[in-house]
Amino acid sequence: MSEIITGSEVKLIIGDFKIANEKLIKGEGLALKNLTNSEISLKALRDMISNNEPLPPDSPYNSFEEWEKHLVDIVKSKRQSIENIKIAKVENEFIEWFLVNGDDSKTYEKYPGV
């Protein structure tokens, strides 16, 4: 049998999600800066490759391919971080709506379908 909770309890639970999302959203500026810097680094590396420049002797990478793969992975990760922030913003819009408009006395199944 699943647990039944009230709207008031739901508000407490989603309030915690809101706080976590706000922390994520607060880092948006830094996340965008990191993405931009990573994209600039990747472009510079690709320019080095297309100009047939040698791998710098002090490079921690064994090849341009290894270096490029590393930067591509970083860019993908940074883009995913930005997407996660966008999702957190949408979630917080709903949470805000529910905190204001949700019926405290209504009951909900805590883990529906589980």
Image (cartoon, rainbow, N blue to C red):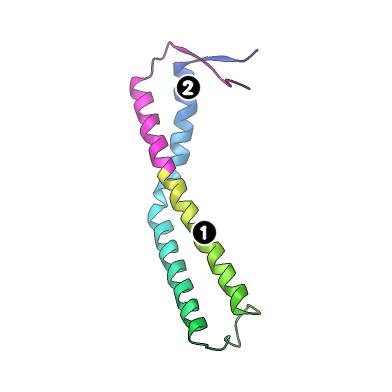
Residue 22 shows in this picture: no
Q: Secondary structure at mark 2?
A: helix
Q: Secondary structure at mark 1?
A: helix
Name the quadrant containing residue 96: top left
Residue nearest the observer in this picture, 50 or 66: 50
Q: Position of residue 35 (x, y in %)?
A: 44, 62
Query: Pointer 2: residues within 10 angstroms few (<14), some, or many (20+)?
Result: some
The numbered dot on residue 76 is 1
Q: Which mark is residue 23?
A: none
Residues at marks 2 and 1, CA–CA distance in whole angstroms: 34 Å
Residue 95 covered by magenta stretch: yes
- Residues at discs 2 and 1 in contact (Cβ within 8 Å): no
Give the amino acid at mark 2.
Val
Judged from this view, the residue extending furthest toward the front is 50
Residue at x 48%, y 34% (from the top left corner): 17
Identify the residue at image location x=62%, y=15%.
2
Q: Earlier in the sequence, mark 2 or mark 1?
A: 2
Instruction: Specify the amino acid type for callout 1.
Output: Lys
Q: Residue tagged by mark 2?
A: 10
Is residue 105 placed above or below 99 in the rendered structure?
above
